[in-house]
């Protein structure tokens, strides 16, 4: 049986956070993050985790720029959902090219769910010699299945323990550019 399309699930999905709420949450994050890096001699290496982290990372980067914080950009792509609604083994599709030794790294992703992705990515950055690795996520999912050893340093919003999409997050590789966070009907 083929899975329903985005157009079929959207009418019964719930809006969890609208655009205005997310705009405000990202602005609040930038208010907290900018002072944490303000006195550094070198700009933090701002690493976007593709694909889901892209819209959030872009918006956060502008908000940080507005607050006077310069960023050096890089990106990586690690995926364990691959268009499905449950995760499996993590696949690295692209690793950042910028040397990390001695750098402060700020990872930007859409969601911290079970934490496997960000734990592996953070460990990899530390193994590269990063001086400090922090995690900024738009959303944290509320449940007790998080793996040990990972938490977000900066969080925009909380989402319920349901499959969510929009604002970077996909429903079967669709819906990433919806300007709100939705949850599939239970
Ligand atoms: O905390 P976890 O349970 O590990 O899940 C979180 C990860 O899952 C999503 O990525 P996904 O694997 O869907 O790749 P994508 O960003 O390319 O969609 C999301 O962007 C996070 O990186
Ligand atoms: N789109 C999406 N990706 C995820 N990755 C981990 N959890 C989720 C989720 O709820 N939605």
Image: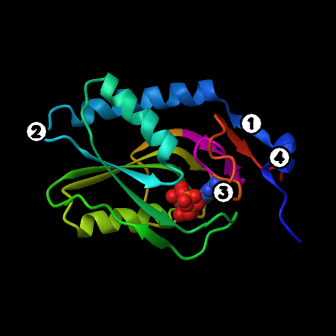
Q: Mark 3 points at which residue?
A: 173
- Quarter for ligand 1? bottom right
Residue 149 visible? The answer is no
Image coordinates for residue 161, horizontal then vertical, percent: 69, 53
Q: Nearer the viewer, residue 28 or 48?
A: 48
C-alpha span from label 3 to label 1: 18 Å
Choose the circle earlier in sequence order: 3 or 4: 4
Figure check: 7 above or below 50: above
Is the Cβ of the residue at disc 3 closer than 8 Å to that at disc 1?
no
Is the Cβ of the residue at disc 3 closer than 8 Å to that at disc 2?
no
The range drawn in magenta is 157-169
C-alpha span from label 3 to label 4: 13 Å
Choose the circle earlier in sequence order: 3 or 1: 1
Q: Is mark 1 on a helix, strand or loop?
A: strand
Q: Residue 7 carries which label?
A: 4
Q: How crowded is mark 2: few (under 14 residues within 10 Å), some or many (20 or more)?
A: few
The response on whether ligand 1 sits within 8 Å of label 3 is yes
Choose the circle earlier in sequence order: 2 or 4: 4
Q: Name the residue under label 2.
A: 41
Q: Which of marks 1 and 4 is in front?
A: 4
């Amino acid at each position: 049986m083929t899975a329903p399309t985005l157009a079929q699930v959207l009418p019964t999905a719930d809006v969890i956070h609208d655009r205005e709420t997310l705009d405000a949450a990202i602005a609040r994050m930038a208010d907290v993050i900018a002072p944490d890096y303000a006195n550094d001699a070198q700009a933090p290496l701002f690493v976007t985790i593709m694909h889901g982290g892209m819209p959030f990372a872009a918006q956060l980067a502008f908000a940080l720029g507005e607050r006077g914080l310069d960023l050096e950009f890089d990106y990586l792509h690690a995926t364990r959902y691959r268009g499905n609604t449950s995760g499996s083994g993590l696949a690295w599709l692209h690793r950042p090219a910028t040397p990390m030794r001695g750098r402060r790294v700020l990872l930007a992703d859409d969601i911290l769910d079970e934490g496997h992705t960000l734990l592996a990515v953070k460990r990899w950055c530390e193994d590269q010699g990063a001086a400090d690795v922090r995690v900024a996520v738009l959303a944290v999912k509320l449940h007790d299945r998080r793996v040990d050893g990972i938490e977000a340093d900066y969080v925009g919003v909380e989402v319920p323990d349901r499959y969510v999409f929009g604002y970077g997050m996909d429903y079967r590789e669709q819906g990433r550019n919806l300007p709100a966070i939705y949850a599939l009907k239970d």
